[in-house]
Amino acid sequence: MSPLQVLTREARTTLWRSLQTFTVTRIVIALVLLLYLGLDIGGGGLRLDAASTVTCLSYLAAALVFGALATWWRRRFAWQLGVQIAADLAAISLLYLEAGGMRSGLAILYLFPLGGAAILAPLTLALFSSAIATLFVLAESTWQVFMQERQPSLMQAGMYGAAFFAGTLLVNRLAARLIKQEDLAAQRGLDLRIQQTINQIVIADVGDGILVVGDDSAVFTGNPAARRMLGLEGEAAGFVLGEAPGLEPLAQAFGAWLRAPVDGASFVTVKPYREDTGPLRGRRDQPVHLKLRFARVDTAGVALGRSVVFMQDVSAIENQAQQLKLASMGRLTASIAHEVRNPLSAIGHATALLAEDLHGPAELRLLKIVGDNVTRVNRMVEDILQLSRKVQPNGEPLRLAAFLAELKAEFCETHGLADDIVYIGDAGENTVRFDPLHLHEVLLNLLNNAVRYASKEAASIRIFPARDAAGRIELHVQDDGPGITPEVRAHLFEPFYTTSSKGTGLGLYLARELCLNNEAKLDYEYRFDATAMGPRRASGRFVISFSQPA
């Protein structure tokens, strides 16, 4: 096997390119020699030196042939290089003799073919060429001593020979090291391209969405899953998060993570939006609930850092989990009435009888604790039993304006609130298909949560209808209290999860189930409100999305 075949394709290309450079240099040297040795400029004008002219012209013709072969016939590299070096040595030797030997100073020309051999040929061939050149120079000097009775400098000839060997050995070792380094770099580049191809395949086929985002929120790239989750058309790159109103929650979550990096996940809801013009074009008809994870990329001191955003569509997972929980709750409710409610009734009746006979402060306090806990457990049972009492929702259209006005009056009267604390937006003539009793139960649950955290100032609790980009009606319930943290948001609609010591953890769960029963959705989305003091304040709101037009 040829040594050239052991190298990589990139290394072989480099050797052929070096051989072409070698042939071009030979053509230039041949032209210079033709002008310097082939022309004799004396007192009688310009004359041709026949012997040197023939040698230089032959050398120039051979150089042109070698250049054409190296360019158009890339085969038999070792054979071409060997013939070229042999021709160089022969031509330089003839010119060396014709010019008078050592005193002409042309021995320096041997460095050209010897250097080329040291770079392109194996060490054995390079040293063999050096040996030929050295022997020729020594032989010519010896000939002059014995046959022409001249006194040439044998020391100078020996120094030339030593220089030939030393230069050849040094250049060959340096060239071999450079070729190995280039071959290693080419192999590393090939491995890197293979790894990039594998990464592209993995990223393209993975189910999670992946975005590469700069610190200025500019999106550099994204995989097909990310485009599908965000409803983007075309490439998921070349835009800034937050350019579309529907992607603002994603931009806000990323900005919050940049300010305070944490290892936990964030949850956002990408609402329906439509963008037909501009750098960001996308269409989405359904809201999608995303779980976000962020990772910082080590950019090794680059001014603008980059991060990777991992997105997981948890809407289907949440729906499946809700169905499993509902099935479990259904099996539980079959035995609650007999196993829990009857003992609760007995305990409550016994407590009432004891209250008639006991009048001491300590006894009354203990009886009150028992009674309060009986009431709490009984309310929990009532909430669970509502799941088994759900009926087919009413299909008649419901006018939101009259319904919300009646609900506000009832809520304010029950809680003793001023009329201006609860703000009802203009519902106009909007109607929805939702069972009135179910919607009443859902909104009362949301308002009870709102009044617990609201400031009780004017319009601190807001209920207002809106329309998404697809034209569907939404009902927003919002208060001016602090927003829900991402940790609480992850478990917000789970049964029996509560942050209040007096709550059962079933209110929001039942509210969402009632919405699902009426083919609607209940979700919590983050938003940022501008304040008079300057910075925007984090807040949130509950959103009921009605899927059926009235």
Image (tube, grey):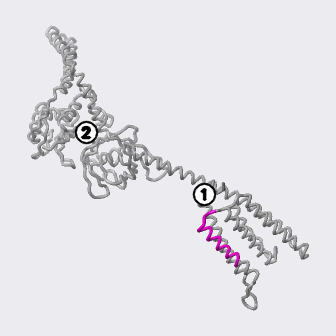
Residue shown at 27% from the left, 38% from the top: 482
- Residue 261, position in %: x, y? 40, 41
* Left or right for 220, reference 522: right
Residue 13 shows in the view: yes
Nearest the viewer among 406 and 544 is 544
Residue at mark 2 to residue at mark 1: CA–CA distance: 61 Å
Magenta span = 57-75
Please give the label number shown on residue 288: none
Q: Please tell me which residue is depicted at 29% across the width and 38% down the height of the picture.
A: 316
Q: Secondary structure at mark 2?
A: strand
Q: Quadrant of residue 364?
A: top left
Q: Which residue is mark 1?
A: 11
Q: Dot 1: what SS?
A: helix
Q: Quadrant of residue 409?
A: top left
Residue nearest the viewer, comparing 428 with 76: 76
Q: What amino acid type should be assigned to the residue bearing mark 1?
A: Ala
Who's the residue at 43% across and 47% down the image? 201
- Is residue 475 visible to the viewer in this orientation of the structure? no
User: Which residue reaches farthest top?
Assistant: 357
Q: Nearer the viewer, residue 428 or 351?
A: 428
**Which label was assigned to residue 524?**
2
Is 393 on the left-hand or right-hand side of 373? left
Residue 492, given in percent of the width and then of the height, sits at 28, 33
> Horizontal placement of 29 versus 407: left or right?
right
Q: Does 337 appear above or below 142?
A: above
Residue 114 is situated, as x and y percent measured from the top left of the image, at 73, 65
The quadrant where residue 346 appears: top left
Q: Is residue 244 magenta?
A: no
